[in-house]
Amino acid sequence: MKTKREDGNSTVDRELGDWKRQRVEVRRDCPYLDTVNRQVLDFDFDKFCSVSLSNLNVYACLVCGKYYQGRGKKSHAYTHSLEAGHHVYINLGTEKVYCLPDGYEINDPSLDDIRYVLNPKFTRQQVEQLDRNKKQWSRALDGSDYLPGMVGLNNIQKTSDFVNVTIQSLMRVTPLRNFFLIPENYHHCKSQLVQRFGDLTRKIWHARNFKGQVSPHEFLQAVMKASKKRFRIGSQSDPVEFMSWLLNTLHADLITTRNNSSIIHNCFQGELEVVKETLQNKAETYRMPFLMLGLDLPEPPLFKDVMEKNIIPQVHLFNILKKFDGETVTTTVGPPARMMRYRVTKLPQYLILHMRRFTKNNFFREKNPTLVNFPVKNLELKDYIPLPAAPTKENEKLRSKYDLISNIVHDGKPDEGFYRVFVQRKSEELWYEMQDLHVSETLPQMVALSEAYMQIYEQQQ
């Protein structure tokens, strides 16, 4: 019995009845295994048939790398096997390998590396060891070496650098990374954004890739759909806006009714006490959660030095953190104008700071070039701002000391510049500069000599 299915693009003959009733022969010996070409295989893109554009029952040709639908007679994969003489195909969903047009399943251990690249897997023991492994280089098929977790990301249409620096930063957040390396942690979640973020995390960290870089294309497609094209391929955006949207959306998709929390809030959520006053001296005090703190930079000077060059001002992180000392007044633009005072009442395990470098007016976007001086290690917040009382539990201290693990910077003019990121590799405490596909080791001193835009600090345990 043959059944036909309308998928919106074409009528697809899937021969469901015949394939279910027939027992597929399983063979280990296949004369076509030597035609498999690992150099052309790339599983970073959407799993759509190259002919019908359907994502149902798609196979990858292991000879040319193209995707085709079905394996029954009259299917696109079957036709391709006859026309091109390509005989080995892997089902992108089940990971089973078949020989077409003969139709038997191939069970050969030599294909396991392809399955691993298609769907990288980690045991919980492997995840626990990731930050304990010293420099263990992996080798791509082209002979190049790469460090798992420190691989470059393709800049798609030269507009996805804001996504790449955000992803590379989040890959340094150990509990978040570990959570997404184990799909069982979120298998209940139907969100494509969650699933694609997990896929991307596993591809960045696995050690048996065929190439030393990863394309975030599938993840970007999920972002475009989930954000209703607020963030899309071909359009530059801001990593601060993207980070805020991504964390809030992942939290909303992962939230459990049991405790109304998620791995996102466990890592990043802190709390502020806000005192809001109006010009009529009416005051209102309330608590509000936060996932990141925005820091205001001082206005740059308008005068030049004796060499007629613009003076690039500098400010210490201590000064701009005073915004959260509970006493400094921040005036908001009205109407009505309000005077706000902020005080941190709960510290997160991972503190995200962003410097408000960009301002918009009716005509153009301006950038504040002020350099921020900050410590790479041992940022002691209690030296800067008043903090909440220590926990009441015995032997538990208020942990207020943080180490930098990620620093996103912006180079160039406001609308023509680009983003790059400095990240720390925890196993050796080495720093790397990452800009799309470019990955290079750098000195800690270089991290602080840049126009910091968004940072992630990790609480010392």
Image (spheres, rainbow, N blue to C red):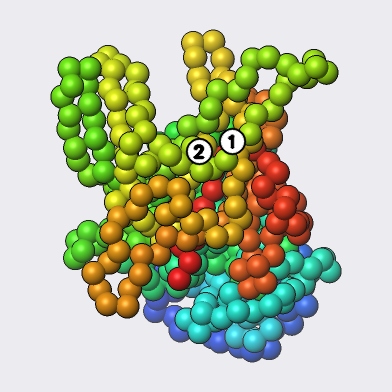
Residue at image coords 64%, 79%: 133
Spatial CA distance of label 2 from label 1 is: 7 Å
Confirm or deny contact between disc 2 and disc 1 (CB under 8 A).
yes
Image position, residue 378 (x, y; %): 55, 60
Label annotation for residue 324: none
Image position, residue 373 (x, y; %): 62, 43
Is residue 405 depicted above or below 272 in this figure?
Answer: below
Q: Secondary structure at mark 1?
A: strand
Residue at image coords 72%, 53%: 445
The amino acid type, in three-letter code, at marker 1 is Val
Is residue 334 depicted above or below 404 in this figure?
Answer: above
Question: 338 and 307: which one is in front?
Answer: 307
Q: To which residue does mark 2 refer? A: 319
Image position, residue 51 (x, y; %): 58, 49
Image position, residue 245 (x, y; %): 41, 42
Side (left or right) of 306 relative to 79: right
Question: 300 and 100: which one is in front?
Answer: 300
Q: To which residue does mark 1 refer? A: 315
Residue at image coords 64%, 86%: 108
The amino acid type, in three-letter code, at marker 2 is Asn
Is residue 269 depicted above or below 410 in this figure?
Answer: below
Residue at image coords 42%, 54%: 382
The answer to whether residue 203 shows anywhere in this view is yes
- Report how many numbered discs are placed on residues in the image: 2
Q: Which quadrant, please, contains the C terminus? A: bottom left
Is residue 330 depicted above or below 139 in this figure?
Answer: above
Side (left or right) of 239 relative to 208: left
Q: Which quadrant, please, contains the N terminus? A: bottom left
